[in-house]
């Protein structure tokens, strides 16, 4: 992809733009936040652990300051400004927490330029949340759906403040793992089968397919907002793999396997953020030609699986989710 340095920088004292990212305290999200902050955005990092997010904010500020001080040209120093970093509490395994986060955010900001649904959980054992959803489905799809649809009116109001060439953007972190779901796709089935070792990947794939459906449906329903999904690449040194690498004894084997896989196919955490950063900042992406698209490692446009691209399935995903949330007393605005 184009170097993040080549993407536009803002002066937040003249043009204050706001981004919200879930799970920005580690892995791919951390480097996404770093670039948005360096590019002058006010970034809300939504996370479940106040101490982990505050620690990452401190590190990010130090890192960004040292990157700024290393700028060699006078032009870079005089035209590039740091934004700001703010903690927002959210636990995606609780719908109530998502709704509280939306309210807290709305009390602090009146506009939202970029929403990044980055947080996720992968290949963990079957468990139900207190909202009675399978844990990967809720973390990777249902809660991002709720967060996004509740913030959509604010995103649309923000769209009215800018020209159509600078629309608000929503980015969803999917995964190439969505391909696993193929003919097994079905949201009402939680796939609580044995062996967990296999079916946990299927649950992940189903959730990440639903997320692609969600972006495609939003692109149709909300043409003022630019919605895209992303596979960041194989980024083997994030916390996403920690359930497997922390298993007693056998964890070391998984760790070795992931390192070998990384050697041949992996990209760094920073490179893993490039597809998201492109979707956030690249001015050449437009509502007319890019809404609903899927980008892979480095920001290369690609086609998701046939199931993920199928708009009948996408509509069913939307309807199923709205009904499930309605059963839990939550109304999604039309
Ligand atoms: N790494 C890869 O190879 C890869 C490949 C394809 C797709 N992806 C996707 O990329 C995204 C980022 O993954 P990553 O590799 O950067 O993993 P990561 O380092 O584990 O980051 C995941 C983030 O999600 C947060 N999170 C998890 N459960 C949450 C919950 N219930 N509530 C709020 N936040 C929660 C984590 O917060 P805590 O720090 O509190 O745990 C963490 O900040 C995920 O959606 C993942 O599925 C990654």
Image (cartoon, rainbow, N blue to C red):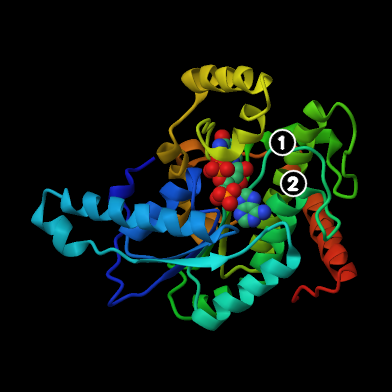
Residue at the extreme left: 74
Q: Contact, CB < 8 Å: mark 2 with mark 1?
A: yes
Q: Which mark is residue 123?
A: 1
Where residue 263 appears, as percent x and y from the top left, is 47, 19
The image shows residue 27, relative to residue 93, as above or below, that is above
Where residue 264 appears, as percent x and y from the top left, is 49, 18
Where residue 332 appears, as percent x and y from the top left, is 77, 73
Residue at the extreme front: 248
* Residues at marks 2 and 1, CA–CA distance in whole angstroms: 8 Å
The image shows residue 173, relative to residue 298, as above or below, that is below
Q: Is residue 9 left or right of residue 327?
A: left
- Within 10 Å of disc 2 (Cα), the crowding (few <14, some 14-19, many 20+) is many
Can residue 229 be seen in this snapshot? no
Residue on which the image places disc 2: 136
Where disc 1 sits, the SS reads loop
Tell me the quarter of the picture where residue 132 sits: bottom right
The image shows residue 99, relative to residue 288, as above or below, that is below
Nearest to the observer: residue 137 or residue 17: 137
């Amino acid at each position: 992809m184009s170097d993040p340095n080549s993407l536009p920088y803002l002066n937040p004292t003249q043009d204050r733009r706001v981004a919200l990212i879930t799970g920005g305290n580690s892995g791919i999200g951390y480097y996404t936040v770093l670039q948005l902050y360096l590019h002058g955005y006010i970034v809300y990092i939504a996370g479940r652990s106040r101490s982990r997010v505050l620690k990452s904010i401190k590190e990010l500020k130090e890192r960004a300051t040292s990157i700024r001080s290393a700028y060699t040209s006078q032009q870079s120093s005089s035209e590039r400004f740091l934004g700001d970093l703010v903690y927002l509490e959210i636990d995606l395994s609780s719908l109530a927490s998502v709704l509280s986060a939306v309210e807290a955010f709305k009390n602090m900001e009146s506009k939202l330029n970029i929403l990044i649904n980055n947080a996720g959980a992968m290949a963990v054992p079957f468990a139900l949340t207190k909202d009675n959803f399978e844990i990967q489905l809720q973390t990777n799809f249902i809660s991002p759906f709720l967060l996004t649809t509740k913030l959509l009116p604010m995103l649309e109001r923000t769209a009215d403040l800018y020209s159509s060439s600078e629309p608000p953007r929503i980015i969803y972190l999917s995964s190439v793992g969505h391909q696993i779901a193929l003919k097994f796709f079905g949201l009402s089935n939680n796939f609580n089968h044995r062996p967990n070792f296999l079916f946990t990947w299927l649950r992940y794939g189903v959730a990440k397919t639903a997320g692609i459906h969600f972006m495609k449906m939003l692109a149709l329903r909300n043409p003022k907002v630019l919605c895209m999904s992303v596979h960041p690449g194989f980024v083997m040194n994030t916390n996403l793999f920690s359930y497997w690498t922390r298993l007693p004894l056998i964890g070391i084997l998984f760790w070795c396997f992931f390192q070998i896989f990384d050697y041949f196919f992996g990209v760094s955490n920073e490179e893993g953020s490039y597809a998201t950063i492109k979707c956030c900042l690249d001015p050449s992406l437009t509502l007319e030609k890019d809404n609903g698209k899927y980008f892979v490692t480095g920001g290369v446009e690609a086609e998701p699986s046939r199931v993920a691209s199928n708009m009948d399935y996408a509509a069913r995903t939307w309807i199923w989710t709205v009904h499930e949330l309605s059963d839990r007393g939550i109304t999604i605005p039309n």
